Each structure stands twice: as structure tokens, then as C-alpha cells.
Image: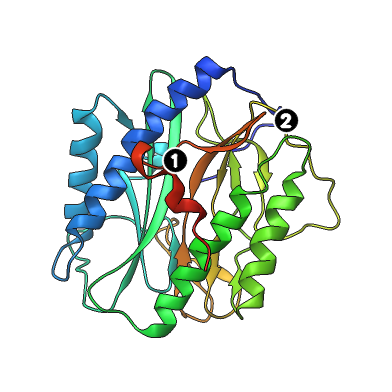
Amino acid sequence: MADQEKVITVKSPEEIQLMFEANQIVAGVLELLRTRIRPGLTTLKLDGWAEEYCRDHKGVPAFKGYRGFPGSLCVSINEQVVHGIPSKKVVLCEGDIISIDFGVKLNGFFGDAAVTLPVGKVSPKNETLMRVTRESLGHAIDKVRVGNRVSDISRAVQTHVEKHGFSVVRQFVGHGIGTDLHESPEIPNYVQKSKSSPRILEGMVLAIEPMVNAGTYKVKVLKDNWTVVTADRKPSAHFEHSVAATSNGPVVLSVLADRENEVFLHS
């Protein structure tokens, strides 16, 4: 859903606080869905819960209506990478992995995060895929330091993922975030050697989102013009956080306030 602008914006501490508040709604939605995921649910049911929680907390679902997207939630199962459309016809099955991406607008600012969750008991390979993707996000967040480059984030993801034999999606990238859902800079999950990479400045807020495939990095878009799937139909995982660059290091805005350390757990 990228629509990047050319100008990179930096946010004041007051604006970052507003973004934290938006992202706390996002985090609350993802935690709610984590507790409710089970076989037999439709993806439309998940969408309804997400929108209800968001509006109860005075937020507006950011994805609904964005370029015509019909849902509040992006729900992508197994070989679906991103942008899966909620549907009453899609039912979760034991062993699935489901990537859930949610965005909120609150007081003029956006929040955005994603997580991949198991449906019941999943295969060891899919457990590893999810773990490595989650770890790669943690490594990337650690590079959100003033003076580093965006390519340091990209390299952290790519190195960790490829070390474990998986691949990073190249067609879709992370992004800046603020008063627009998608701002500059783009944040690829691999190093683009042919392009210059911006410096990370104090006050930048970045939505970092590794999309990791079990097989090839190549993807295709289905006929609905939204759902992205792996070209070889092998599983994919997706994790995302909105992160502020501060003089004291990265601040993860989209983790529930009492769980901040969880994102930095590496194994």
C-alpha cells in the first residue's frame, strides 16, 4: 500500500507522542486478535473485531477505503504475503499461519504494525519462519539510530533472514509514517546497492516490515488486485513496527506500553 512522498519529515516529541497513542490502538488490536485466533473463524470476523476495537478507542481504521481497499484489516494466510482481503468465505484452519496488518489514524497521525500468528499447532518449518522474521525485525529496529543509514536497517534484515535459508520480498518495502500513512523514505528489506540511502535523523518515524518467504523472494498479485502471494506458493511471514529515531536510540511505538522489551528478544 505504498504511496511514498519525496520529502522526509521529522517529528517533534509532541508529534511522536501522538503517534504513540495511535500505535497503542494498533497494538491493542493485534493483541486482541492474538488471543482470539482459532480454527473455524472467518477472516471477516477478525476484521469486524479490529474495526470495533479501533472505533471504541476513538481511532479510524487507516486501510479501509485506502485506494479502494474494502477492509479494515489486511489478513494474509500461508502463501499470501500481504494485502489479503477479509472475507466471510475464508475460514482459518488448524496449521495455518496468518499475517495480520493493521493501521489507525488518530488526531491526524497514523500508526501501523503487523504480526504473523499460528492457527493452532503449526509445522516446525513455519514456526522457524515466523521466529526468524520476528527476529529480523528486532535486529532492524536496533539499527534505528541517529547517524545510521536506512541501508543499515535493510542489511540487518537481509543478513539474518538469508543466514537461515529464507528470502526477503523485494517488490514491497517499509516506509516512513506520520501525517500520511506512507511517507519517505522507503525501507527495503534488502540492500539496494545501486541507490543512495538516507541518513537516519532524530525525529524520523519508520514503519519497518520484514516480509520473509520460505522459498523464492518473487511474488505476484492475484486478480483481486490486492492479495500478494509467493510465486512458488510457499509460506510467507510478515512482522512490522512503527519506530521513532531519538537521541536515546529507537523507540518502538507499536508495542503495548508494558511489553516494550519483547520486540528485542533474539534467539
For the point 41% across and 38% down, the residue is 66
Answer with the quarter of the image where residue 82 lies. bottom left
Query: Mark 1: which amino acid?
Result: Asp
The residue positioned 38% from the left and 26% from the top of the image is 21
Q: Which color scheme did the rendering employ for the protein? A: rainbow
Label 2 Cα crowd, 10 Å radius (few <14 / some 14-19 / many 20+): many
Which residue lies under the disc numbered 2? 201
- Image coords of residue 6 (percent x, y): 71, 31
Please indicate whether residue 43 sits to the left or right of residue 261 in the image.
left
Reply above or below: 12 against 44: above
- Measure how far apart labels 2 and 1 are at the Cα level: 20 Å
Q: Quadrant of residue 206?
A: top right
The image position of residue 8, as x and y in percent, is 69, 29
Question: Extreme left residue here?
Answer: 40
Q: In which quarter of the image is residue 50?
A: top left
The kind of residue on which mark 2 rests is: Leu
Viewer-closest of 101 and 65:
101
Query: Which residue does the numbered mark 1 point to in the structure image?
Result: 112
- Residue 135 lies, with reference to residue 264, above or below; the image says below
Q: Find residue 213 and report its horizontal and vertical position in percent.
A: 53, 73
**Residue closest to the eye, 84 or 145:** 145
